[in-house]
Image: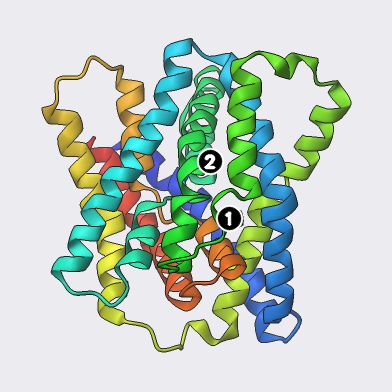
Amino acid sequence: MTAVLNSFRASGIAIAQVLVLAGIGYWLARLGRLDRELVKGISSLLTDVFLPAFIFYHTCRGFPQVGFTLALGLPVLGIAMLLGSLGLSWAIAKALRLRNPRVFSAVVSFQNCGYMPLIMGSVLLPRPQAEVFYVWVFLFIVGFNLLVWSLGVVLISGSRSGLPLSRVFNLPFITTVLGICVAGLGWDRFLPAFAWNTLEILSRPVLPLSMLVMGGILGMNCMRCNVDNRALVTAVVTKLVLIPIVVLLILRIVPWDISPGLRWFALLESAVPSAVSLVVISERYGGDTPFISQVLFYTHVFGLITMPVILALG
């Protein structure tokens, strides 16, 4: 019972922080202080400056702090979970004949795999364990970033042909690959403290600006715009309930020799809400922003209930 209550507390703190930031963006938009052009400008700033710094900084910092097996295994785990979720969500979208299976699959499969787990770990784990857990999260994000800033951009933008290479080989994707190479070869030790401090400062605005963008879009009448409610409900249920249950069953059935901590980590990553960066991608490269924004909002709201329950079952 204590574990369940602690899980509710941790997820409540994480989601409350996300929703407060989104609420600021929402009211700024409702007051007319945040319009679509400004949102697009912030999205461009995120994808061209702050996100690349965030990705490179945490990729380089994460790799040297764990063993070689985990340094390679966690990014692979991130890719495997995403591809599995994409396959399952695509099958659901096709079976139910949803209008836009590409966007549905993307918003269901790409999760808030960084900020949400970090908050959960900081609340639930003792400090020594939490510091190791943070490294796991940053390494897991490497696999996420490789896909969300390549395949995710393709799925959300909806281009069937002639997709510019700049959309696939964008700055977040390039800095992910660069961070892996620099950290893997040990070249990160040649970067001066000034460079690391600058990258760390540039990393800080990623979450608040991303949430302001999401809240601003919701404030620009997206909460009342005409979206496919059947697809919206299906996306929320698939993301928060179906995918975590599938991962839970796999962890129980398959006799993998992994630690309980890694099992809990994998289950947590499957249970978190949809990724905030999806709305940034949609604004930057084009996509069904109203639908994506509403899925993000409702997965974060109902995730307050589903996340602790899923983790308690694990």
Residue that label 2 marks: 119
Can you say which quadrant of the picture contains the N terminus? Answer: top left
Residue 209 higher or lower than 83, as above or below: below
Image point (41%, 52%), residue name = 110
Instruction: Identify the image quadrant of residue 274.
Output: bottom left
Rounded to the nearest angstrom, the CA distance separating label 2 from label 1 is 10 Å
Mark yes or no: residue 166 visible: yes
2 and 1 marks in contact (CB < 8 Å): yes
Q: Secondary structure at mark 2?
A: helix
Image point (38%, 40%), residue name = 269
> Which mark is first along the chain, 1 or 2?
1
Residue 243 higher or lower than 188, as above or below: below
Label placed on residue 288 = none
Q: Secondary structure at mark 1?
A: helix
Q: Viewer-proximal residue, 116 or 62?
A: 62
Residue 23 horizontal/vertical position (percent): 60, 70
Image point (31%, 17%), residue name = 259
Residue that label 1 marks: 17
Furthest residue to the front?
162
Amino acid type assigned to the residue bearing label 1 in the image: Gln
Residue 143 horizontal/vertical position (percent): 46, 36
Amino acid type assigned to the residue bearing label 2 in the image: Ile
Q: Within 10 Å of the Cα at label 1, are there few (<14), some (14-19), or many (20+) other Cα atoms?
A: some
